[in-house]
Image (tube, helix red, strand yellow):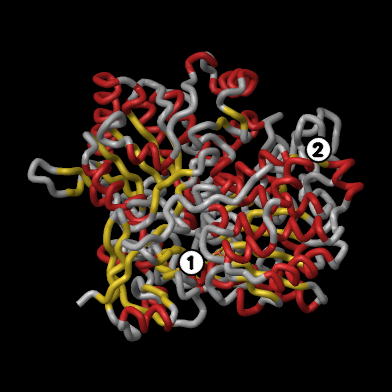
Amino acid sequence: MQNTVTPTHCPYCALQCGMNLTPAADGTVEVGERADFPVNRGALCGKGRTAPQVLASGARLTSPLVRSADGALVPAGWDEALDRIAGGLARTRAERGADAVGVFGGGGLTNEKAYALGKFARVVLGTSQIDYNGRFCMSSAAAAGTKAFGLDRGLPFPLEDIPRTGCVILVGSNPAETMPPSLRYFTELRENGGTLIVVDPRRTRTAEQADLHLAPRPGTDLALALGMLHLVVAEGRVDERYVEERTAGWEEARAAAMAHWPEYVERITGVSVPELREAVRLFCAPEAAMVLTARGPEQQAKGTDTVGAWINLCLATGRAGRPLSGYGCLTGQGNGQGGREHGQKADQLPGYRRLTDPAARLHVAGVWGVDPDSLPGPGRSAYELLDALGTDVRALLLMGSNPVVSAPRAAHVEERIRSLDFLAVCDVVLSETAALADVVLPVTQWAEETGTTTNLEGRVLLRRRAVTPPDGVRGDLEVLHGLADRLGVEKGFPTEPEEVFEELRRASAGGPADYSGIDYRRLGEGNGVFWPCPAPGSEGPPHPGTPRLFLDRFATGDGRARFAAVAHRPSAEEPDEAYPVLLTTGRVLAQYQSGAQTRRVAELNNAAPGPFVELHPRLAARLGAAEGDPLAVVSRRGRAVAPARITTGIRPDTVFMPFHWPGEGRANTLTNPALDPTSRMPEFKVCAVRVEVAR
Ligand code: SF4
């Protein structure tokens, strides 16, 4: 395999940038430009460029670890480790029932792994208790998109449409730091005469490039969207014909928006009436426009309604299901899109089918060769599952996630994990969660294995194996095969990714996310295929895939999009005398999610070595804090300490902390697990805190 150039994709974010990997004789791996891949055209951010360093990291696990009698994790053979896991899961199931065993997945797992993990939970363990960390990522956008359009696909159009539209409103999204190569789409938009509006409480690197930056108080962008819709109506900018022909529910949504007077919205959000008017003018002036959301509006206890309000704005102005227009979500994790389609979600079967749909159960059970009545029903959502550990759920198999750092109310989640009877973790390094396990399995990484992912556009991609994995590690599919075998299911869990994908094709056939017309050969020859892509009839040509959705009709029963009748409501936790400041959390350029991988790369660590508390000079003056002073941030859930970073680029009533680190600077110690009633998304983006200089 040496000196062979392998075209593949980055392991990190949902852009899934193309790259070429070339292993060298000294064991290093060179990253080369893959200019032919249209999404990033050769550009990579520092995370992608340095990703091979994680392959050779000294922190890499190369042997299973098991908890010894004296409490230490010690190396063990694979058979012993798999026996222990199978024994732990089987014992819990026998003593307490199948739902006492939980499974927790991740949005970075390939489609094949996500599919196999869901099947493993439901067929081998018989448990309903499976969910994954993607619930923390985009579930509100998925819920709102499904309500409005009958189908959720992050972007229902390709990224290449962005530079050709007239205006983009980016809500709670900072692609300049989270997915830098995507910034060129917005730069080109402006070069082409289009306008960019950024909605963010912080003046981020993305906001700096905007024509208009609106900085609402965290947790109030639902009101902001309603205020804009109010002005759209008041200024006669509604596309009446489109509303009549392609939507339903307008009167209720209109009435709700009309109750949100601009002056009232100004008081709630802090965005002035002239700014609101300017945003409406910029959005409505061109023929085509888009609204793109990310975690800002989504990670709220009213995230589904907030995204629904932004979709309303698109629908009222005739900007959805039309060329170069629409609403889209910029998904975060590497396989955030595919990871939510194939069965590792608590309420879902492969092909984006609902677990409660009898026809879906019948179809998928047929592919799996089981009785549909044997399939469990929906289980708990991610936070609710983590909160139930040690009580109703006593054993957990965890793959591709690090909730000790990334879950809300993290100290409580850590305590729940510690109280489990049995924990097994598959990971590439000893993450903070793996360190608590009874058994840790060292698994292969992106460049050491083949598999598919689906990027934020719904483009299904082939990640290829480019290097040989180290001795001692195995793939996640091998783990599931070995465990299924030990738990009495000898067939149905192949170790070859292509074999799993072939089954996934059949399981997804006819579902909303239909992959049945996609195969490895086709993916290997091109730059991906957009789902839905049904298999052709016996004589027909291959389906071309579907880059643009909803152009003729929406995926609802009557083909019409649905307005959401939503109103402003406060966040689950508002500031008060004891906790007078708002906290919002997010990411920085050089780190990724819980940092389990990126904290192991020296260049990234040097660039972003630890957490910080970003605050406005006025707040700093009130606190008597200087740049670099240790600040204690205290919420009702705990306390975190990190140095002050003073900037005028944040509202004076708000502090920001990135969430990539464990320890005393762990931002998620503070965050609020209040859940959105529909998506079950926790409220990561806003909670009330007290800030003081830690003397
Ligand atoms: Fe990887 Fe995302 Fe960076 Fe692209 S933008 S190189 S996919 S982390």
Residue pictured at 55% horizontal, 45% vertical = 139
Q: Say which mark, if any, is on residue 405.
A: none
Residue at the spot of label 2: 560
- 592 vs 200, nearest the viewer: 200
Label 2: how many residues lie within 10 Å, few (<14), some (14-19) or many (20+)? Answer: many
| Above/below status of 301 relative to 11 | above
* Position of residue 42 measured from the top left corner of the image (x, y, whole percent): 64, 71
Residue pictured at 56% horizontal, 30% vertical = 349
Q: Residue lying furthest right in this view?
A: 241
Residue pictured at 75% horizontal, 72% vertical = 278
* Position of residue 38 measured from the top left corner of the image (x, y, whole percent): 71, 64
| Above/below status of 96 relative to 560 | above
Query: SS of the residue at dot 1?
Result: strand
Amino acid carrying mark 1 in the image: Pro
Query: SS of the residue at dot 2?
Result: loop
Q: Quadrant of ligand 1?
A: bottom right
Can the viewer see residue 452 in this picture? no
* Drawn side of residue 481 relative to residue 85, left or right: right
Q: Earlier in the sequence, mark 2 or mark 1?
A: 1
The quarter of the picture where residue 92 lies is top left
Q: Say which mark, if any, is on residue 23.
A: 1
Q: Quadrant of the C terminus?
A: bottom left
- 292 vs 180, nearest the viewer: 292
Label 1: how many residues lie within 10 Å, few (<14), some (14-19) or many (20+)? Answer: many
Residue pictured at 61% horizontal, 79% vertical = 208
| Above/below status of 619 relative to 66 | below
* Position of residue 441 measured from the top left corner of the image (x, y, whole percent): 31, 45
* Drawn side of residue 229 relative to residue 664, left or right: right
Can the viewer see residue 482 in this picture? yes
| Above/below status of 411 relative to 487 | below
* Position of residue 465 measured from the top left corner of the image (x, y, whole percent): 52, 54
The quarter of the picture where residue 602 lies is bottom left
